[in-house]
Image (tube, rainbow, N blue to C red):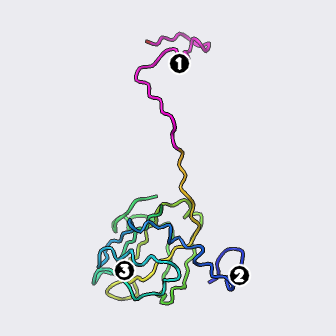
Amino acid sequence: MACLHDHSCEDHDCSSDWSLYKHIDLSKVSALNEAVPGSVKSVFKAWEQRLNSSGEHLESNDGDPELLVYIPFINREGIDFSDAQDMQAIQEWDLVENLQGVLEYQTRYSKFQSVANITLHFPDNFGGDTTQIHYIGLKGEATQLKRDVVATIVYELRPNPSDHKTKSESGGGLSHVE
């Protein structure tokens, strides 16, 4: 699948250039209904390692294919299955089995700007007793979260009348401050 920027990807492997792997906070990645606790972390790897299935993988509990994967970056905090079923999805995809690790699903760009985390809900699989996932890759452009820091805070326990204009000083009616 061709990428969406301004060059031919036949001469350039741009998949790793746009990978968000290095921006995922792996220590806080989690999954609900995983058979082996913590195994979800193993499906996030560099693009070049996506076909390496010799290691760990994420698998749902036996007889229950549903998985919920929480991916924090450096909107909404983690959710559970009940929340996932009750909430309106920002975007849904019809997934197909992808053993080669090359399928990409297009997202609505405007819906995924300025996100701090993503939760993926896999409600079912392709007919097996469990769901197995060996690789999840996310592509995009990471930006740094910018927050304005409050430099000076003034707290007035008891107002000083000379610090405040009264209505009488500004041409209004009578004012009295004690």
Quadrant containing the C terminus is top left
Most frequent secondary structure within the magenta stretch: loop
SS assignment at label 2: loop
- Badge number at residue 8: 2
Left/right of residue 40 with respect to residue 168 in the rendered view: left
SS assignment at label 3: strand
From the top left corner, tell me how far across and down residue 6 is, in percent.
72, 74
Q: Amino acid at mark 1?
A: His
Magenta run includes residue 133: no
Badge 2, how many Cα within 10 Å: few under 14, some, many 20+?
few
Earlier along the polypeptide chain: callout 1 or callout 2? 2
Q: Nearer the viewer, residue 75 or 22?
A: 22
Single out the mark in the foreground, 1 or 2: 2
Q: Which residue is mark 3?
A: 58
Start-end of magenta stretch = 149-177
Quadrant containing the N terminus is bottom right
- Badge number at residue 164: 1
What residue appears at the point 41 percent right and 20 percent down from the top-left corner?
158
Q: How many marks?
A: 3
Q: Nearer the viewer, residue 173 or 71?
A: 71
From the top left corner, tell me how far across and down residue 127 is, in percent.
37, 88
Left/right of residue 108 with respect to residue 116 in the rendered view: right
Magenta run includes residue 169: yes
Marks 3 and 1, how far apart at CA: 63 Å
